[in-house]
Amino acid sequence: MSNQTPLAADNAAAVQPPKNRRGFMLKALGTVVVLAAVGWGAWYFLEGRWYEGTDDAYVNGNLVQITPLVAGSVVTIGVDDGDLVHAGDVLVKLDPADATVALQQAKANLASTVRKVRGLYSNVNGAQAEVAVRRTAVDKAQADFNRRRDLAKSGAISAEELSHALDALTTAQSALTTAQQQFQSNKVLVDDTVVASHPDVQTAAARLRASYLDEVRSAIIAPVDGYVAKRSVQLGQRVSPGTPLMAVVPLNQVWIDANFKETQLAGMRIGQPVEVRADVYGGSVTYKAKVESLGVGTGSAFSLLPAQNATGNWIKIVQRVPVRVFFTDPKQLQEHPLRIGLSTKVDVNLHDQSGPLLATHAPTQPTFSTDVYQQQLVKADAIIQDIIHANTTGDRDVRHTDGDNQARR
């Protein structure tokens, strides 16, 4: 006999739904699941399988280290972290006193060398004149000897006088030979040159250029446009060549290093289009980019302590390969700048698989370059020309060649 009262039985019956309604709900749920599975499958085979994505992707870029080329004490710091600088702007100044003194010594040395070289040309001209004098003396002594020889045949003069004429001719010839040798010795020092191209002058000019560069390099300039980061230099600090002072980061040249699983690389090729979303903008900004290169090794292979899979117990771990992604629209970086190290999400479109897996051509142009140092020697060359001109005023540059004179005969 049941203990359930008639009122409780009626309530239970009211709570239980009809069997036909329950079956309808189950069928509807099953239909939805099936349709969702079919829809997902269709999306995957038609679209989803043509994309590979990862959120293990970070912004990277060039950290242009600013280091001095000469030693010195810091007297001025012109920028600080976060400041915008342009190529050629002075970032740090070193005390130029030592370099200025060395430059003055180099200028004086060049002037002195030019005057000494002028003396060499004068010696050549003097030796050439001496050769001409000695040749005239030889011609006179030869004529005197010939005349006395004819007279001696007729007995008009003594043999002793003829012997004296021969001695005079021999002496004149010896003096001519000595003068010609001295002329050649002096000529070798300046042969086929002018004052400006003389080796001694060129050596002194090179020393002046080096001293000028030392003075110019006491002002440390920015090689590229960018933003200052990692400033560590302080006033009064004694720095030596190669000491890191700060870095300049050109944020318009950043890229993405995306670390894909090795199982995601089968259809990935260089040149494929990429969509990048940065966490800093909450995914509201989509950057256009492309695959620039696929890594030639996994991250663990190039780590400080590579994995030694042949030792001890081994557990297979899916490796990741770095893929470099370059932005294709510079305006997007100007409107929504990125910083080094920011997290991003990368989606690669795999539809076009005609590109190579690895680069097929070597670069023909520099990847990055700067021209801020090309004009440093222009002023130095102008100073050298002025010094040479000032110390050769009134002279003519004489070029000595083998056929320019008769002293070689």
Image (spheres, helix red, strand yellow):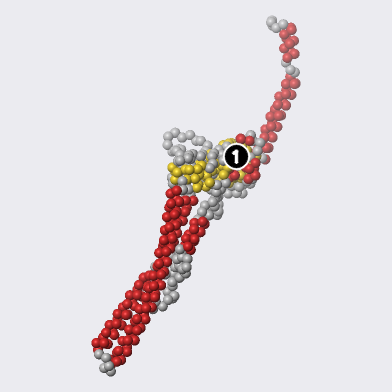
Name the residue at 49% across, 45% down.
Answer: 93
Name the residue at 74% across, 19% down.
Answer: 19
Instruction: Using the rendered view, name the quadrant where residue 36 is placed.
Output: top right
Instruction: Using the rendered view, name the quadrant where residue 279 is placed.
Output: top right
Tell me the SS state at disc 1: loop
107 over 342 or under it: above or below: below
Name the residue at 61% across, 49% down.
Answer: 354
Q: Residues within 10 Å of mark 1 (few under 14, many from 20)?
A: many
190 over 209 or under it: above or below: below
Residue 90 location (% of width, % of height)? 53, 46
Q: The C terminus is located in which quarter?
A: bottom left
Residue 35 or residue 332, whichever sits in front: 332
Residue 162 location (% of width, % of height)? 27, 87
Residue 250 location (% of width, % of height)? 57, 44
Q: Which residue in the structure is indicated by mark 1? A: 338
Instruction: Using the rendered view, name the quadrant where residue 31 is placed.
Output: top right
Of the residues shown, which amino acid type is indicated by label 1?
Leu
Residue 94 or residue 327, whichever sits in front: 94
Classify residue 295 as left or right of residue 102: right
Classify residue 45 as left or right of residue 177: right
Is residue 401 visible to the viewer in this orientation of the structure? yes
Name the residue at 60% across, 49% down.
Answer: 355
Q: The N terminus is located in which quarter?
A: top right
